[in-house]
Image (spheres, rainbow, N blue to C red):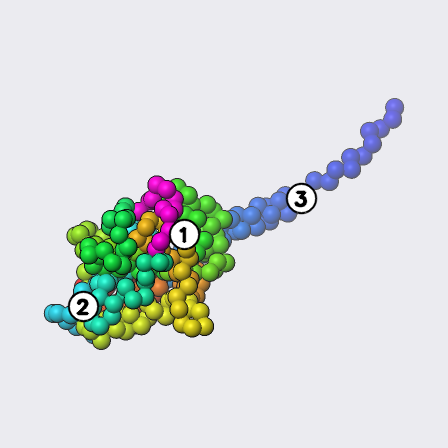
Amino acid sequence: MTPDAPSTTRRTPASARRLIQRGLVALLALPAAALAVYLIAALLLGAIPVNASRVPPAQGVTVYLADNGVHIDFVLPVAAAGIDWRQEFRAAHFAAPLNPPDPPFPLRLDPALPPDANPATTHVVIGWGDAGFYFETPRWSDLRASVALKAAFGRNPSVVHVEYWPTPAPHPRLYRLVLTEAEYRRLVEYLRGSFARDPSGQLLPHPGRGYTVHDTFYAGTGSFSLILTCNEWARRGLEAAGVKTARWAPLPWGVRQHLP
């Protein structure tokens, strides 16, 4: 009787299997651990104020911070303290068809009038962020993992989103802030530094990229990342102006918690 041929299949020792399993668990735990460290750092540094001794003025230039729960924009008077944004954000930069045709943002101004010449225009909204995220995610339903990952790791250029508004209506996520003229001018200087420019110093608009006829995009400076988010960009603007704010604020609540 011929004995069975010896098996050529080798079994992995139990100790090796356990080692592999532990390695896989550790590998899967790394993203969760990194996220926890990130959130703890945001919480701790968000609680530490800069410009803590600042005393808000009773009168001055009123600006707003608009928070949609994820992203913060500055809302500034279209003309104040000798600064008229209409001289920089001209109608030709906004002359684009609606994109997309059903805009995710409401039409706040009459589309038949140039936004910089519309008598109802009183404010300009300025925000900064990742170009791919802004251009490819007009609605949250358009968000793709590839877009989010490229934005998180600074793989795209930045843009500045500009929109003309009528007088802002009261809203729970619209935060009022009064600045002295000196503080406002420092904020304006910071914001102007967020725009890329050609050799002659002119802004670089992105024609046809606006969501409506009264908003548009310009090439920005710097790159969005997990460290420099749109909210951290806004926080740095407040710090540059001399306003009390967080030490670091990658998330919107870090900016909100120090507002008067």
Q: CA distance from mark 2 to mark 3?
A: 73 Å
- Indicate the position of residue 236 as horizontal and vertical percent values: 33, 68
Q: Is residue 49 above or below residue 206?
A: below
Q: Start and end of the magenta stretch?
A: 94-105
The residue lying furthest to the right in this view is 1
- Badge 3 marks a residue whose secondary structure is loop
- Badge 2 marks a residue whose secondary structure is strand
Q: Are marks 2 and 1 in contact (CB under 8 Å)?
A: no
Disc 3 target residue: 13
- Indicate the position of residue 189 as horizontal and vertical percent values: 31, 72
Q: Amino acid at mark 1?
A: Gly
- Indicate the position of residue 173 as horizontal and vertical percent values: 23, 53
Q: Amino acid at mark 3?
A: Pro
Q: Are marks 3 and 1 in contact (CB under 8 Å)?
A: no
- Marker disc for residue 240: none
Report the residue at 32% width, 58% height from top.
91
Report the residue at 24% width, 50% height from top.
109
Whichever of callouts 2 and 3 sits on the residue coming sooner in the sequence is 3
Q: Let me know if residue 95 is in the magenta part.
A: yes
Q: Amino acid at mark 2?
A: Val
The reply, left or right, for residue 198 in relation to residue 235 is right
Mark 2 or 1, closer to the camera? 1
The residue lying furthest to the left in this view is 58
Residue 52, image quadrant: bottom left
Disc 2 target residue: 61
Report the residue at 24% width, 48% height from top.
110
**Does any portion of residue 71 appear in the rendered image?**
no
Disc 1 target residue: 208
Q: CA distance from mark 3 to mark 1?
A: 63 Å
Mark 3 or 1, closer to the camera? 1
Whichever of callouts 3 and 1 sits on the residue coming sooner in the sequence is 3
